[in-house]
Image (spheres, coloured by chain):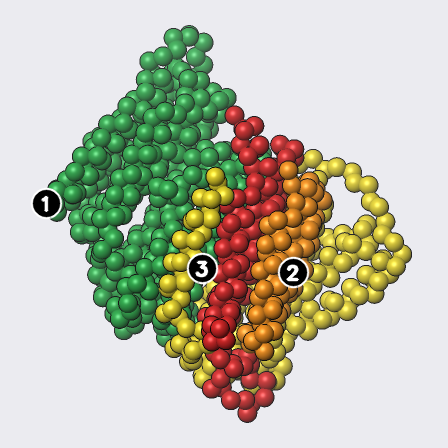
Chain colours: A green, B yellow, C orange, D red
């Protein structure tokens, strides 16, 4: 009997124990995150077949919901926790060698706690608990963005912190308003009662929730912090922020809209917001010369695409959105990890400094190219089936509105192709200097890069590996009555 | 310009919020979960302070998250401040005699008071956070009055780690013996006695140590650096 | 009773406005601490002694201390 | 007037603090000032949460004597939430202040506008 609460408790306990381990063996800190995340990956994979049949409800403290905090380990929760554990494990292996300067022990503690917070957000079934885990996620990412102590890092961490904490205050006001109306904090309990409330009194809390969570999810007007934070953090952290943190924010937005409020009325508004986010992100990415800023803006664009797909609101659309989320996580993490050592080698983040890198670091550059192709949506990589699913879902609605918007998505993809091919051209076809000494990234970086490439190709060729899970996750989001029934019995 | 835009935004926000406040009138009982805790809390948890039983037992998972947030802040602060790694030799200006003596006299009293507050958290107002904060303010006094003294880094790290681990281990023991994480597996005892309420005082003592050492560590880091 | 509460609320809001006006950051922090202290009294009047203790110990005392330490490390006056 | 005071005075205080805090965050250029604004915003939110749980003529939810009538006890849940929120607030403030100390070391100023100009 494996209890889903272990997914949160074991990493948390290990993170608390890191200072103790460090007393006996200085170098122990960096091996703890891989161990904890490996454990999480195994537990998630064990739980996955069980939750596909029926979600597991864990009540903490031994009382019945809604009188206690409960975890809901449904298909969505376990799918996300598996993704978090997988990406976190691979990136932590990368960090074994990549993180050398500064307070290394603190880096690894914060890193593990960030991922624990993310796991907590996706598993919890209580809005205040969601807020607490959200804070764990956010505060550890503020500290990690500033980890290198450079002036740009500190400045963007400050910006991120101010916007993030205003967002979480909004979230807290929203929680207070909901508690005042319904007298409970349990998501399922609120969802059950919310149908009886007047729509006017629900509008303000919903706006507060969406703005509060939207800061972390980087939805269009609220994403000013993102390019700076993602580009000035260490590359391993950029991979996690782009690959995990904003996706978890988007998960929370989706959960609030679909499960708590059951608000199908604002979906078309969100679809427009998603398209705006997409276009702004892609156009800004196109005009960047700094490779990490380009990748960060491209994350904004991808988030817009995922939001659009989720806002289609059909089971195809939500499944496509989740699939796109999965492929973005894998591809963007790969891109940032590869870019980390390319920057290290070039000594600069400017794209022009990468000339001829394809000859100096062939494997890393090949991995970067594969990540870019996958993000753009070329077969046989995972970006292809996911984008295909989204286009199909939009056309299947047979509404002119979504068909027009999907045209704009394709326009965004064209811009995406343009800027990624510009980088690839610089990598391979420029700089004819013959002094190219081959020196690859160290083995600890190549292993995770190899695994990411393998995953991207495998899922791209056999999308059926994940479609079952994605479909049941989509139906968990869309059937809020099932969710309520499974929690409250 | 910026100011007018800000004021306009705030007016819109204020109007929206006052609109929604009409649905939650002030002073009217409107709870369901809270009523259950008041009626059943003493029987179910053994703690007479219902807020404590909510904080530590019914919603104990939040508290675990909360001490984690403080832990993150302490570590993150250390990481941010020591990123340059340069240790400067500081010139310490000694405090005046009155301040020094007063602080030395008050420090143990404050420590005892803080300990009292967190040990009696399940009976009277107060608990781990308040007690921990009081202890940290005692250390603040020491930094003001006896400027050459420092708490040992190792000891405070140890207190932080052990406090957090105690919380997690008690929760896991609850999972083993009670079937649920954080379930109260110890005897509840009689209400209003010091040794009652099962795991609640133990967790609050752990939280008190953890919060006290973390807040003291934060102050120490801020004073020490730069 | 209601007049005491109204007076306290007005005092608190005045403290908040003062915190925004003062160009001397130490004064601004002291005004913010006044806000926290009055809030602690209001918490007590709202029958929340636990919160009042926490607000007085954490919100007023410790927060003011770390603000003042930070201001001593940086610049005292707003430019 | 009296009835307005009776029913809305706490909410007025709470949202007054929230709006003043937001105003400071939006308008001021000095980083420490902005952090002070964050603190005021937090206090306002906490006051709002506690007043949501209040009952007219309520007593604290503590059975210090067993014969206390539980009919008029105020809701303990918002108080528990606020305890959590206060600690989270101080954690964020401490981190923000340490960041501002570092920022001052790098730029020699805490004026956010000047920092943005120096950046590129």
Residue at 80% from the left image edge and 65% from the top image edge: B106
Of residues A24 and A281, the one nearer the viewer is A281
Q: Quadrant of residue A181?
A: bottom left
Q: Chain of mark 3?
A: A
Residue pictured at 56% horizontal, 76% vertical:
C2
Give the side of residue B151 with respect to residue B206, left or right.
right
**To which residue does mark 1 refer?**
A398
On the image, the x and y values in percent for residue A425 come to 32, 17
Residue labelled with disc 3:
A172
Sequence-first tag of 1 and 3: 3
Establish if A405 lies above or below B124. Answer: above
| Residue B125: percent from left, percent from top | 60, 75
Please give the residue where the numbered disc 2 appears in the rendered image.
C34
Image position of A247 with respect to A43: above or below: above
Q: Nearer the viewer, mark 2 or mark 3?
A: 2
Pointers 1 and 3 within a single chain: yes
Q: Are marks 2 and 3 on the same chain?
A: no
| Chain hosting mark 1 | A
Q: Is residue A454 left or right of residue D1?
A: left
The secondary structure type at the circle numbered 3 is helix
Left or right: A417, with B181 as reference point: left
């Amino acid at each position: 009997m494996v209890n889903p609460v272990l997914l949160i408790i074991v990493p948390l306990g290990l993170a608390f124990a890191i200072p103790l381990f460090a007393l006996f063996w200085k170098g122990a800190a960096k091996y703890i995150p891989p161990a904890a995340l490996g454990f999480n990956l195994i537990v998630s994979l064990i739980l996955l077949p069980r939750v596909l049949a029926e979600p597991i409800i864990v009540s903490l403290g031994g009382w019945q919901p809604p009188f206690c905090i409960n975890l809901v380990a449904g298909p969505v929760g376990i799918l996300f926790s598996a993704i978090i554990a997988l990406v976190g494990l691979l990136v932590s292996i990368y960090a074994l060698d990549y993180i050398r300067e500064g307070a290394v022990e603190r880096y690894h503690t914060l890193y593990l706690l960030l991922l624990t917070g993310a796991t907590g957000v996706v598993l919890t079934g209580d809005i205040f608990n969601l807020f607490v885990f959200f804070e764990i996620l956010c505060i550890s990412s503020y500290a990690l963005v500033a980890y290198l102590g450079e002036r740009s890092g500190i400045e963007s961490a400050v910006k991120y912190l101010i916007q993030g904490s205003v967002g979480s205050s909004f979230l807290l006001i929203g929680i207070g308003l909901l508690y005042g109306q319904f007298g409970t904090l349990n998501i399922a309990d609120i969802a059950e009662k919310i149908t009886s409330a007047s729509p006017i009194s629900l509008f303000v809390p919903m706006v507060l929730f969406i703005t509060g969570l939207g800061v972390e999810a980087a939805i269009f007007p609220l994403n000013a912090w993102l390019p700076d934070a993602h580009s000035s953090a260490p590359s391993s952290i950029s991979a996690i922020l782009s690959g995990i943190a904003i996706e978890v924010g988007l998960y929370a937005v989706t959960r609030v809209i679909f499960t708590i409020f059951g608000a199908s009325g604002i979906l078309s508004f969100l679809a427009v917001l998603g398209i705006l986010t997409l276009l702004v992100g892609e156009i800004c990415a196109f005009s960047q010369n700094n490779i990490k800023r380009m990748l960060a803006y491209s994350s904004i664009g991808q988030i817009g695409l995922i939001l659009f797909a989720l806002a289609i609101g059909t089971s195809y659309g939500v499944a496509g959105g989740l699939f796109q989320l999965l492929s973005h996580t894998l591809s963007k993490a790969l891109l940032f990890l590869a870019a980390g050592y390319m920057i290290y080698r070039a000594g600069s983040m400017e794209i022009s400094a990468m000339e001829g890198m394809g000859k100096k670091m062939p494997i890393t550059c090949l991995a970067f190219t594969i990540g870019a192709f996958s993000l753009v949506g070329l077969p046989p990589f995972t970006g292809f089936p996911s984008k295909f699913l989204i286009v199909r879902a939009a056309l299947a609605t047979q509404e002119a509105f979504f068909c027009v918007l999907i045209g704009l998505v394709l326009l965004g993809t064209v811009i995406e192709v343009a800027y990624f091919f510009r980088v690839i051209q610089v990598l391979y076809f420029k700089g004819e200097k013959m002094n190219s000494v081959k020196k690859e990234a160290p083995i600890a970086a190549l292993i995770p890069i190899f695994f990411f490439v393998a995953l991207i190709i495998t899922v791209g060729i056999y999308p059926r590996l994940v479609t079952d899970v994605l479909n049941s996750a989509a139906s968990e989001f869309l059937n809020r009555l099932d969710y309520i029934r499974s929690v409250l019995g | 310009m910026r100011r007018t835009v800000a004021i306009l935004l705030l007016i819109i926000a204020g109007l929206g919020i006052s609109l929604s406040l009409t649905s939650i009138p002030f002073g009217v009982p409107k709870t369901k979960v809270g009523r259950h805790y008041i009626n059943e809390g003493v029987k179910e948890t053994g703690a007479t302070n219902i807020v404590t039983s909510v904080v530590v037992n019914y919603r104990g998972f939040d508290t675990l998250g909360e001490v984690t947030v403080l832990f993150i802040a302490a570590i993150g602060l250390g990481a941010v401040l020591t990123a340059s790694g340069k240790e400067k030799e500081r010139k310490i200006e000694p405090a005046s005699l009155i301040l020094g003596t007063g602080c030395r006299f008050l420090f143990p009293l404050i420590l005892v008071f803080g300990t009292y507050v967190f040990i009696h958290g399940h009976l009277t107002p107060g608990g781990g956070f308040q007690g921990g904060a009081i202890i940290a303010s005692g250390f603040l006094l020491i930094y003001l009055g006896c400027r050459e003294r420092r708490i040992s880094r190792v000891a405070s790290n140890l207190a932080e780690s052990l406090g957090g681990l105690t919380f997690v281990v008690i929760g896991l023991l609850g999972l083993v013996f009670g079937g649920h994480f954080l379930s109260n597996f110890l005897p509840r005892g009689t209400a209003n006695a010091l040794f009652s309420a099962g795991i609640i005082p133990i967790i609050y003592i752990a939280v008190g140590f953890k919060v006290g050492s973390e807040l003291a560590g934060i102050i120490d880091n801020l004073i020490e650096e730069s | 009773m209601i007049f005491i509460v109204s007076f306290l609320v007005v005092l608190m809001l005045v403290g908040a406005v003062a915190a925004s006006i003062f160009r001397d950051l130490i004064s601004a922090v002291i005004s913010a601490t006044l806000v926290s202290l009055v809030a602690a009294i209001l918490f007590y009047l709202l029958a929340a002694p636990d919160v009042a203790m926490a607000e007085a110990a954490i919100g007023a005392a410790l927060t003011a201390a770390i603000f003042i330490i930070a201001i001593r490390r940086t610049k005292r006056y707003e430019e | 007037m009296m009835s307005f005071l009776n029913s809305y005075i706490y909410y007025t205080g709470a949202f007054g603090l929230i709006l003043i805090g937001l105003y400071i965050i939006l308008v001021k250029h000095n980083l420490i000032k902005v952090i002070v604004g964050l603190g005021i915003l937090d206090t306002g939110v906490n006051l709002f949460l506690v007043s949501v749980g209040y009952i007219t003529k309520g007593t604290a939810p503590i059975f210090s004597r067993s014969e206390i009538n539980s009919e008029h006890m105020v809701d303990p849940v918002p108080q528990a939430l606020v305890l959590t929120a206060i600690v989270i607030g101080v954690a964020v403030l401490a981190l923000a202040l340490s960041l501002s100390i570092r920022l001052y070391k790098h730029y020699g100023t805490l004026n956010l506008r000047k920092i943005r100009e120096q950046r590129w």
